[in-house]
Amino acid sequence: MHNTKEQDLLNIGIERFIIPAEDVAHVQPDNSLEHALLVLVKSGYTAIPVLTTSYELCGLISKAQILDEILGIERMEPERLSQFLVRDMMTEDVASVVTTSTLERVMTVSINYPFVCVVNENGAFDGIITRSKLLAHLNGYLHEQRRLSNLDSNRDD
Ligand code: AMP
């Protein structure tokens, strides 16, 4: 059973947490693995979304997937980077929510993922929400609640 304060916290909209699409590093399905690895290494991210030119969400690609692909039995095989496209290696099973979801929904989905993709009512990619941003918000909320309850108990003394 949630109390009213928890309800307020969990029912808020998620817009304020979204990193907008234009700020999200991404690749396209027809890019080479070499290009994807460059974007991943230069951006410093572990995984990034795969989007079409019209910003439809197709999947995710990670450094680990690419490195696993070029790791041969006895040596690295970097030549494989130009032999495959992002669409050949990407994961299509993407953690996503819709723009109108509540914070409660995003928190539940993000338990197992470092970031969650946000898709709008037309199916277009709106951006991502990182688990770290959610935790920072929750941390701020809990500290504020503690401060308020300390104020209340000082007033009662
Ligand atoms: P963070 O919580 O900021 O460390 O981000 C967690 C993960 O979310 C990163 O490793 C990336 O996979 C993804 N991510 C965060 N910000 C971006 C961004 N601007 N563009 C693409 N992916 C991002």
Image (cartoon, rainbow, N blue to C red):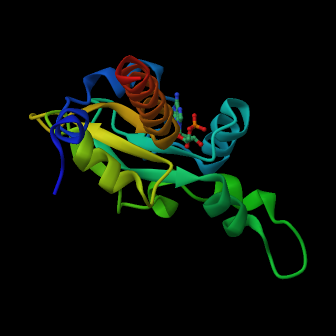
Q: Is residue 56 left or right of residue 148?
A: left
**Could you say where residue 55 lies in the image, as x and y percent from the top left?**
30, 31
Q: Is residue 82 left or right of residue 22?
A: right
Classify the position of the N terminus by image quarter: bottom left
**Could you say where residue 3 lies in the image, as x and y percent from the top left?**
18, 45
Image quarter of residue 42: top right
Residue 67 visible to an observer of this rendering: yes
Q: Is residue 45 left or right of residue 104?
A: right
Outermost residue to the left? 121
Above-or-below relation of 74 to 80? below
Classify the position of the C terminus by image quarter: top left
Image quarter of residue 37: top right
| Nearest the eye: 24 or 99 | 99
Q: Residue at x 52, y 52 (%)?
A: 61
User: In terms of image quarters, where does ligand 1 lie?
Assistant: top right
**Could you say where residue 110 lies in the image, as x and y percent from the top left?**
39, 52
Q: Residue at x 50, y 32 (%)?
A: 136
| Nearest the eye: 115 or 62 | 115
| Nearest the eye: 118 or 50 | 118
Above-or-below relation of 70 to 133? below
| Nearest the eye: 31 or 59 | 59
Q: Residue at x 31, y 55 (%)?
A: 108
Residue 95 visible to an observer of this rendering: no
Q: Residue at x 42, y 36 (%)?
A: 138
Image quarter of residue 8: top left
Q: How many marks?
A: 0
Outermost residue to the bottom? 73
Outermost residue to the front? 157
